[in-house]
Image (cartoon, rainbow, N blue to C red):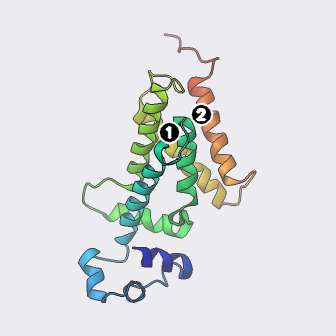
Amino acid sequence: MDAAMRLFCEQGYDAATVEKIATAADVAKGTFFNYFQTKEAILPALAERRMQQIENMLSPRRGAPASPVARIKLALRLVAEDPLTDPQLTQRLFAAMMKRHQREVSPGHALVHLLADQVRQAQAAGEIRPNLDPTYIGCVIRTLFFQQMMMWYCECRPAPLPELLDRMVDLLLDGLAGPKWRPPLS
C-alpha cells in the first residue's frame, strides 16, 4: 500500500500501473493480486488505513488536544492533508466504493463514525448540546467538510484550507451550541 500511495502521488493514478506498484513494493505482480483484485481496490484499503491512523492520532495520550471540538478540527485538517484528498484520487476512491457490492464500511462512513465519537465526547465535556444525535452531527460535519474541499479544489480559496475548516466548525458550533439558540416553536 505504501508503494502504491507513493506512486499515485509521484506519477498520478493512471500512470501507476499494477506492474509498477509490484516492482516498487519488491513483490511479484501475482502477489499484488493476492491482496487486491484490481488497482482500484487498493484505494479503499488505503483510505481505511488512513482513517485508523487519524483515529489513533486523535488520542490526547498521543498529544492531541484535550478539547473534543479541537480534535474534530484536527481530524478534518488531517483528512484534508492526506494525499487521498487529491481530486483525481478522491474521484477514483468514490468510484471504487460505488462499485463495491459488499456491505463494508466506506471511508466516508468511517469519517462519520470518527466525527460522531468526537461529538459524543464533546457532549460529555459540555462543548456541544447533549440532545443532538452525534451520528447526524457527524454527517453534517462530513458534508460541510466535502463542500469546503470541493470549493478549495475549484480555486475558491478565500483563506488557507486549515483556517477554512476551523471556521466551518466554529460556525456550525455557534449554531449548535451558541448562547442564542432556542427551541423551535411547536
Q: Is residue 62 left or right of residue 178?
A: left
What element does badge 2 sit on? helix
- The quadrant in which residue 35 appears is bottom left
- Using the numbered discs, state the Cα–Cα distance from disc 1 to disc 2 in whole angstroms: 9 Å
Give the image location of residue 149, x and y in percent.
60, 54
Q: Which mark is residue 66?
A: none
Of residues 52 and 98, the one nearer the viewer is 52
Q: Is residue 77 left or right of residue 164?
A: left
Which residue extends farthest top?
Answer: 186
- The quadrant in which residue 157 appears is bottom right
Can you see residue 114? yes
Amino acid marked by disc 1: Val
Residue tagged 1: 140
Residue in the image at 26% along x and 87% along y: 30
Residue tagged 2: 172
Residue in the image at 53% along x and 45% along y: 64
Residue in the image at 41% along x and 29% along y: 133
Give the image location of residue 61, x and y in percent.
46, 44
Are dots 1 and 2 in contact, CB under 8 Å?
A: yes
What element does badge 1 sit on? helix
**40 up-or-down from 57: above or below:** below
Of residues 150 and 78, the one nearer the viewer is 78
Give the image location of residue 99, x and y in percent.
33, 65
Amino acid marked by disc 2: Leu
Q: Residues within 10 Å of mark 2 (few under 14, many from 20)?
A: some
